[in-house]
């Protein structure tokens, strides 16, 4: 039986009518309905029903968080995945929410994507409240930011692999290419950035403690961004990695060994033991740094995913009529019902 903390519901197009009885109000944004995306001929053999979807190797499982603040980004992310997928009907989204307004979030997703199969999970924020210490940006301290640590507990045991996406990105390639990467013996796959100054992610207190610093001994540790990860949930569960991450969170609470939200525990546990994914799958940092959020350019090379990690979010900059040039790449996936004056911000300049 699923523990009471982790409750999920499965929704398909058949539930949309029932979901419509929940009115969207307050600060929950409203969106235009997306067109239906259908599988191509090459996907016919992979046809599936909601029953047994977890066991079907043709089904792609993607996890994202949902809340009112980032909902606009989440919807754009889903839309981008579906638009570029070769077999969009073979995708199941696993949404995680902490808010009591889950019925409204569910209705919003169902109304915006009537053909989408998705599950909505409740994440009890009390699981992490005693383990979170303040960081350099308030958004990084929210309990939902730590839900990625608990995916193996939240999702049914029958889901063996998951792609985790942050809510501030868009995919401009077939997500099946990312899904099908070979993780080999690794638990986790992600683009690595070995040129980054790894020492900056931890405090002097960390590096001055021999037992802490020894955590990286014998590991070719590189930075990786946790906003795009492919995770083998079977290996995660077998290795009890949630407990390993929680252990570092408890140490942080006592000794303050880092400054940056949920990222450092992942680096402490996995850095140097990550299956390297092409950089094209996380062109990150487009939101600038965590303090000012200034405009940035793309990294050199091909692009399959654009990620506005950092303080600056494209929907906020667009609404303020102060967009960065690359925000124009996000705008076509924005289904938010906004005024014409906002939607024309890129054409008026």
Image (spheres, grey):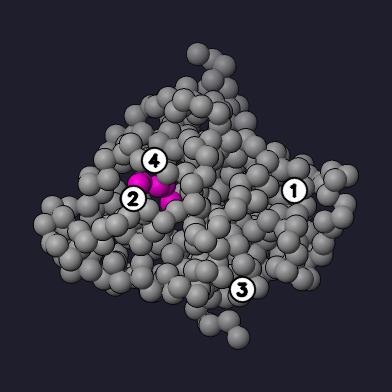
Q: Is residue 272 left or right of residue 202?
A: right
Q: What is the C-alpha distance between the residues marked 3 and 1?
A: 22 Å
Q: Earlier in the sequence, mark 3 or mark 4?
A: 3
Q: Percent from the top left, x then y, of residue 305? A: 55, 38
Q: Name which quarter of the figure residue 141 lies in.
A: bottom left
> Is residue 296 depicted above or below 181 in this figure?
above
The mark found on residue 220 in the picture is: 2
Residue wearing tag 4? 193
The mark found on residue 88 in the picture is: 1
Q: How many other residues sit within 10 Å of disc 3, few (<14), some (14-19) or many (≥20)?
A: some
Q: Residue at x 60, y 39 (%)?
A: 171
Q: Percent from the top left, x then y, of residue 292? A: 29, 34
Residue wearing tag 3? 156
Magenta residues (range): 221-226
Q: Residue at x 29, y 67 (%)?
A: 249
Q: Quadrant of the N terminus?
A: bottom right
Considering the numbered disc 1 on the image, is that residue within a helix, a strand or a loop?
helix
The residue positioned farthest toward the top in the image shown: 349
Considering the numbered disc 2 on the image, is that residue within a helix, a strand or a loop?
loop
Q: Earlier in the sequence, mark 2 or mark 1?
A: 1
Mark 3 or 2: the one toward you = 2
Mark 2 or 4: the one toward you = 2
Number of marks in picture: 4
Mark 2 or 1: the one toward you = 2
> Could you tell me if residue 315 is visible in this image?
no
Q: Earlier in the sequence, mark 3 or mark 1?
A: 1
Q: Name which quarter of the figure residue 320 lies in.
A: top left
Prevailing secondary structure class for the magenta stretch in the rendered image: loop
Q: How many other residues sit within 10 Å of disc 1, few (<14), some (14-19) or many (≥20)?
A: many
Q: 170 or 121, which is in the foreground?
A: 170
Q: Earlier in the sequence, mark 3 or mark 2?
A: 3
Q: Percent from the top left, x then y, of residue 139? A: 35, 51
């Amino acid at each position: 039986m699923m523990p009471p903390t982790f409750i999920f519901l499965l929704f398909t197009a058949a539930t949309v009518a029932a979901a419509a009885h929940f009115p969207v109000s307050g600060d929950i944004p409203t969106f235009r309905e997306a067109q239906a995306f259908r599988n191509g001929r090459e996907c016919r053999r992979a046809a599936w029903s909601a029953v047994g979807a977890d066991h079907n190797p043709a089904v792609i499982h993607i996890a994202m968080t949902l809340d009112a603040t980032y909902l606009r980004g989440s919807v754009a992310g889903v839309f981008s995945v579906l638009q570029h997928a070769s077999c969009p009907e073979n995708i199941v989204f696993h949404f995680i929410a902490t808010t009591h307004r889950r019925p409204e979030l569910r209705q919003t997703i169902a109304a915006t994507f009537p053909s989408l199969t998705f599950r909505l999970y409740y994440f009890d924020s009390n699981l992490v409240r005693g383990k979170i210490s303040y960081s350099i940006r308030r958004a990084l301290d929210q309990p939902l930011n730590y839900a990625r640590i608990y995916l193996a507990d939240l999702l049914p045991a029958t889901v063996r692999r998951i792609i985790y996406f942050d809510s501030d990105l868009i995919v401009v390639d077939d997500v099946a290419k990312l899904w099908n990467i070979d993780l080999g013996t690794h638990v986790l796959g992600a683009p690595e950035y070995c040129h980054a100054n790894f020492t900056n992610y931890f405090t002097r207190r960390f590096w001055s403690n021999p037992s802490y610093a020894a955590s990286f001994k014998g590991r070719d540790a590189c930075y990786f961004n946790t906003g795009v990860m492919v995770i083998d949930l079977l290996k995660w569960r077998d290795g009890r990695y949630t407990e390993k991450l929680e252990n570092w969170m408890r140490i942080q609470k006592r000794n303050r060994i880092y400054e940056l939200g949920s990222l450092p525990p992942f680096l402490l546990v996995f850095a140097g033991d990550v299956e390297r994914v092409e950089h094209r799958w996380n062109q990150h940092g487009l939101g600038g740094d965590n303090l000012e959020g200034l405009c940035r350019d793309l990294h050199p090379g091909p692009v399959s995913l654009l990620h506005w990690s950092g303080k600056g979010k494209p929907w906020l900059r667009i609404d303020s009529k102060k967009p960065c040039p690359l925000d124009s790449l996000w705008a076509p996936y924005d289904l938010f019902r906004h005024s014409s004056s906002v939607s024309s911000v890129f054409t008026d300049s």
